[in-house]
Image (cartoon, rainbow, N blue to C red):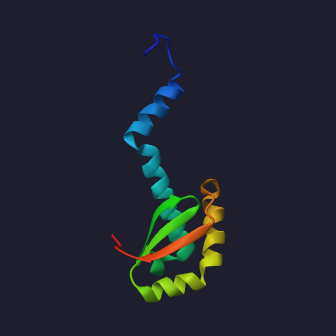
Amino acid sequence: MPNGTPQPIANVLAQLLARRGYARQSAAASCEAAWREAVGQTLARVTRPGNIRRGVLEVFVANSTLVQELAFQKTQLLDRLRQSLPDESIRDLRLRVGPIE
């Protein structure tokens, strides 16, 4: 307590969680679950959602053929993601061939 006054426990917990990165991990887990639900189990195995920056969700895909397939489904996927993650304000997907861990 720099100024000597007690802080509400909610503020202390929020600071602790932010320092530990819990909010970021929780958001990532929510995003992964929403992505799995949006694309289904088969495509979820060969794709991985990344970060959301300025309303754009980056998605890593196993190969270029799947990038094209997902591009055809982009409108439906965005609708599903917006329903599952309304606070994220996802407006677009960036599909990239990349590592699926």
Q: Quadrant of residue 84?
A: bottom right
The residue at the point 36 percent across, 73 percent down is 100
Q: Is residue 66 above or below residue 35?
A: below
The residue at the point 63 percent across, 58 percent down is 89
The residue at the point 39 percent across, 37 percent down is 19
Relative to residue 92, is residue 16 drawn left or right?
Answer: left
Residue 44 image point, x, y percent: 45, 75
Residue 41 image point, x, y percent: 47, 77
Q: Is residue 5 above or below residue 9?
A: above
In front of the other: 15 or 34: 15
Q: Residue furthest top?
A: 4
Q: Residue furthest bottom?
A: 65
Locate the C terminus by quadrant. Answer: bottom left
The residue at the point 51 percent across, 57 percent down is 30
Residue 95 image point, x, y percent: 49, 76
How many labels sit on residues? 0
In front of the other: 18 or 94: 94
Residue 88 image point, x, y percent: 60, 56
Q: Is residue 25 above or below residue 47?
A: above
Q: Residue furthest front?
A: 54
Locate the N terminus by quadrant. Answer: top left
